[in-house]
Amino acid sequence: MGLAVSDALGVTAQGLPTLERKRREDDLTQIQKTVEEYSVVRVIVGNPIGHGGGETQMSRRATKFAERLRPRLTCPVELWDERLTTVEANRSLRESGLSLQKRQSAVDRVAATLLLQSYLDYLENERRREREAER
């Protein structure tokens, strides 16, 4: 499972070591520890919705995971569209010239970083629109 955090200003995303999934309970506990360690103020869970924008079996699983995570944390947990983040991560890693083995071990981290960066960019665009509307 890929993990990423933003800088203190919420401008850039940085990948963390990939969480090797074990049992759901262990995964939730590890995420809780990471949230505490990095003083996270919001958790973004990738939502693998369909290309047409509809719900998929995987998006239902992501929703359930987020629902199980929420009671463990003191910060909000949001779902965020993750369409094409893994494709983009694989493309970027392939273009970087990494071997297949290294790409496979890095793809979740890079995809999580891209997901978080898209969320941060969205927030910045919303703030910019609000400032412009106030003028």
Image (spheres, rainbow, N blue to C red):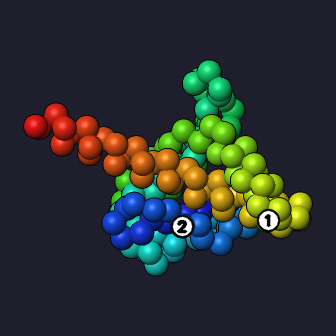
Count of marks, rendered view? 2
Q: Is residue 29 left or right of residue 2?
A: left
- The percent coordinates of residue 58 (x first, y second) are 68, 38
Which quadrant would the N terminus be assigned to in this image? bottom right
Q: Report the amino acid beneath label 2.
A: Gln
Q: Is residue 38 above or below residue 13?
A: below
Residue 71 visible within the image: no
Q: Residues within 10 Å of mark 1 (few under 14, many from 20)?
A: few
- Residue at the image point whose x is 34% and y is 43% from the top: 125
- The percent coordinates of residue 75 (x first, y second) are 36, 60
Q: Secondary structure at mark 2?
A: strand
- Residue at the image point whose x is 59% and y is 66% from the top: 15
Q: Report the amino acid beneath label 1.
A: Ser
Which quadrant would the C terminus be assigned to in this image? top left
- The percent coordinates of residue 83 (x first, y second) are 62, 37
Displayed quadrant of residue 6: bottom left
Residue 13 visible within the image: yes
Q: Is residue 70 above or below residue 133?
A: below
Q: Residue furthest bottom?
A: 37
Q: Is residue 61 left or right of residue 70?
A: right
Q: Residues within 10 Å of mark 2 (few under 14, many from 20)?
A: some
For mark 2, what is the residue? 14
Label whose residue precedes the other's in the sequence (1 or 2): 2
Displayed quadrant of residue 126: top left
- Residue at the image point whose x is 67% and y is 67% from the top: 19
For mark 1, what is the residue? 105
